Amino acid sequence: CCDSSSVNIIVWLTCKSLAPGALERIGDTIADRLRVPWFSGAVKINVSLVPPLVLLPVCLHVAALHFLLGLIILTSLPVVVLWYYYLTHRRKERTLFFLSLGLFSLGYMYYVFLREVVPRGHVEHSQVVTLTCGLILMLAALSRAKKDPGYLPILAGNERPSLQGLHNKSVRESSSGLHGISGAASSRAVNGEAKGYCRMSAGQPAGVKKDWCTKCQLLRPARAGHCRLCGRCVRRLDHHCVWINSCVGEQNHQAFILALSFFMLTSVYGIILTLHTICRGRSLFVALFYCPGAYSDYSSALSFTCVWYCAIVTASMGYILLIQLLNISYNVTEREARLALRDNTGRRLLGGLVIDTGQYNRGLLCNWGHFLSLGSSPPQRSAEDIV
């Protein structure tokens, strides 16, 4: 006999009305049954990995057929990506679509460069080696950025102190003069940041409640935040990046900036090499907007289309990198900037590109020195754990 999901699919194919939520169950069933054979058994494929692998080559090859097709497709692609981003953001879902799109774009652009641009003979071997090294360094930094962003450990259920016990302990500390070092202030501060963490009941004063995480049941140290997509609290949480499918926090923020920087340098260098090959005798900026021989043959048209695709992606990543560098210069995270705008406690600078909360800003050099020292020392235990 058939299960309920199979019945829903049959009803859908016969054009009959579907019950509420049936389409979601159909999608889940298809995603669960989509597997490929492997030595150790069938391996389940994440559906979000498939669209970039299929749509990107098809769209770029179609866009290379004519200038107008290229204009339409290259304009539509960012709109579709943004629409899917807001869709997953609203549903609070994690997806591998953006990571798959980014990695496959890198691989496919590199493939087109080796197959269509290098054989023309205008690119030297040293330039190919330089581009390859930049790609490898970027992937290495991306791999590091994918690791632990600085998750706060979650104690087992039997290790969690009771609310009444914490309240009694807080009373005892207050009577013995230790209240000043309990809670969030108990952890040692480094440039205004508390590095430790501790547990506290939700019944504490209002000034402390703002750091209590009801999901993880712990008291967050200064600048830590809870990611609703990862379901964990992260030290010095900056934001959840869909392009790495992970949070950016204290432990991987440096690697994230390094990956963005290597990507920008490698991408711009590849664009320059390609334009100098297919649009010879023209400056970089002119060749990007006016290259008469770009559509004279399909190879040149495909290379020129990939250049424009790279230019769009590079401009987007360049904006992200600019915002990140400005935030580091003012020692503010994206999460803190959003909270400051919500609470009207920050001031917009540089035309609104950065929100200065003034809470952790210690000057340009000190701010960058603090950023470069992130993750250099292990988190310390709080005074509450010691007492």
Image (cartoon, rainbow, N blue to C red):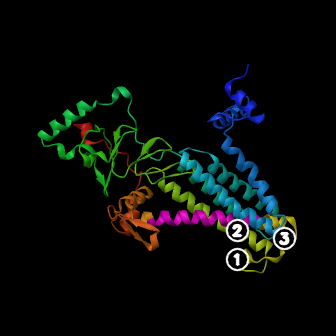
Spatial CA span between label 2 and label 1? 9 Å
Q: Mark 1 highlights which residue?
A: 284
Q: Mark 1: few, some, or many residues within 10 Å (few <14, many ≥20)?
A: some
Q: Is residue 87 above or below residue 31?
A: below
Q: Amino acid at mark 1?
A: Leu
Label 3 environment density (alpha carbons within 10 Å; few <14, some 14–19, many ≥20): some
Instruction: Check the image and name the residue furthest to the top.
Output: 1
Which quadrant of the figure contains the N terminus?
Answer: top right
Q: Which residue type carries mark 3?
A: Tyr
Q: Does 301 sit left or right of 240 as displayed?
A: right
Q: What segment is highlighted magenta in the picture?
A: 305-326
Residue bearing the label numbered 3: 295
Name the amino acid type tagged 2.
Ile
In the picture as drawn, the residue positioned furthest to the front comes out as: 17
Q: List x then y, in percent, for residue 325.
A: 48, 65
The residue singled out by tag 2 in the image is 271
Residue 214 is left or right of residue 175, and the answer is right
* x and y percentages locating residue 108 in the rendered image: 74, 55
Decide which of tag 2 and tag 1 comes sooner along the chain: 2
